[in-house]
Image (cartoon, rainbow, N blue to C red):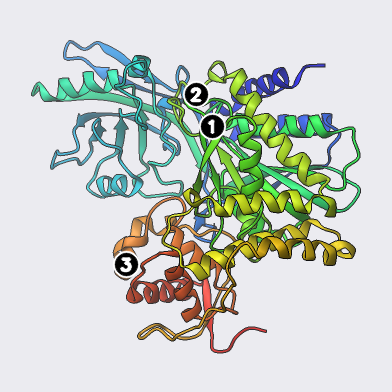
Amino acid sequence: MKNTLDYMLDVIRRIHAHDRWYNYSEGKKTTDLVEDLMRELGMVDVQTLRFPSDGKINHGGWVMPLCWDARDGFLELLRPDGTKELICSYKDTPCSLMLYSHPADVTAQLVLPDEEDVKGKIVLFRHKHVSMDEVLTYLDRGAIGIISAILAGPHYGKEGFEYLEDVTQWCNYRLPLWDVPQKPFGFSLTPRKGKMLEELILSGEPVFVHAKVDSSMEPGTIPFVTGVLPGETDEEILLTGHLFEEGANDNASGVAESLAVVRSLAGMKHKRGIRLAFTNEARSFQAYLNNVKDIPRIAAGINVDMVGCNLDDRGWIQDTDVISPNFTVALLESCLKKQNLTAGILHHPDNDIGLSDPLFDVPMTLVEFVNDANYHKSSDTPDKISPEFITRTFNAVEEFTATLVDFGAEDVEALAEKVVAYEKDTTHFSGKATARFSNERAVKRLDSILRLVPVEEQKKAAETLEKYKNKFGAVEKMSVVPTPGLIAGFPERLYCAMFSFERYIDRKEKYPEISSLIRGWVAHSWVNYAMMLSDGRHSTYEIYQILNEYGFEVEVTLFNALLEFMVSEGFARILTEKKA
């Protein structure tokens, strides 16, 4: 039987062998592999749930993408003497073909972004990252494709990272994941190749390339792979992670580590089960939460992401303190410290922790170590995983999980001590929050421990927690004052979990009042906090004051515009009376 480290490295290699192609067909092989791995560990209820995904359906604004399959794709430089030079090939370097590239077989001129006439041409970006909305602007001007030759992150050009000159960035969020009339394609090049092409363009002679893409974008389904190691009760501890991306660290490491935690804890009786849920990052979790009615009884959870290597010992953990202050961050920080790992605190809802939504109110956090020079690059390969580092992060996540699967009333005091230490550490917070908010947050975080205690033992546990609550100031009841000009009422959202404006990226001009909020991926923190508090029980005045107590400075007109947008687009409604 493999030891834990060898098991994780083997799983990473096996997942990466499929996901490095990051297309729909290989993704099916990944789900089959992960299902088999779960069953080998004695997990039950193993299945891949699939939700409709057609580039139109959205859950909280997150578009469920068209299912993209790539078979081949290459870019050739056409020399004046008639010869061709291969610049990149999907079969050689999968990252060189941008995700959601449409089929193409064209010869076109290559131009730089400042070219006025881009109609029928391909635009090369070498000095800035081009966003999806910028790409759409060039497509509206007639461009047929784009090429990017720039690397994300601060490492390129620094001593010790010379190898990045020949590394390709994975461009997964440049082209629309829905159908657009221009049917664009895109390539990603190494900095060295990009510099060569730019110099040719700047020499004054027209530069032509031949682009061929063999791909398809069709309606299909988006997967959500899950299974459970049963416990003695129907309560479960949830470990989430994502699949279907090209990397070994940013993709396979979190899944492999979660499987290894189950493997380590299997064969012993535990009060709670351990559920694994592996997703198409954020999207299929959104689909799951907005479609499945009978969600398991999750007591707490953690999203494990990017835990295989790092250039220092500092990572990030997530604290949903505005909407759901809970014990998970304090416990996780303690587990990391035992491995000589430190973490900054992210104060916004993101990734696969959607169950922290107050509608579900599950204590959840995230762990990730993002200081990886190979993040989203062709160089994020299994050989870059650090055996020493992934062992340390595994030890931390295993301790976190083991603590929770058998947690009982006898453990309340030890966890309360960790919560108090976390709350007393002022480096965790911006300092903008009011004293009332800070005290309320600390008390709620301590109270969240009670959900791990059986009903018959909660009275005694609550008494124990009182002495820890006394370490903070008295919690004053918020005095709600009507804000002049603010829309009155009790907003109630009609979707679950996080919000994204991505379905509106290509039509910002239709929503001028909130155009500053429209961006890709997850919405601004304050937007998500405002909407997550919109449960029909908080008035607009309460929500606005909570945002200000936390430290957000939101203009009344923008807050009103957000509410009006959410109502008009069917994401929310405003009740005239408080919901019972």
Position of residue 143 relative to residue 547, above or below, is above
In percent of the image, x 49 and y 67: which residue is there? 435
Position of residue 260 relative to residue 554, above or below, is above
CB contact under 8 Å: marks 1 and 2:
yes
Q: Which residue is mark 2?
A: 380
Q: Which residue is mark 3?
A: 510
Q: Residues within 10 Å of mark 2 (few under 14, many from 20)?
A: many
Tell me if residue 279 can be seen. no
Q: Which residue is mark 1?
A: 250
- Amino acid on which disc 2 is placed: Asp
- Amino acid on which disc 1 is placed: Asp
Q: Position of residue 457 (x, y in %)?
A: 87, 62
Labels 1 and 2: the sequence-earlier one: 1
Labels 1 and 3: the sequence-earlier one: 1
Labels 3 and 2: the sequence-earlier one: 2
Mark 3 vs mark 2: in front: 2
Q: Position of residue 253 (x, y in %)?
A: 61, 29
In percent of the image, x 44 and y 74: which residue is there? 563
Could you say which is closer to the camera, residue 332 or residue 6?
332
Tag 2, which secondary structure?
Answer: loop
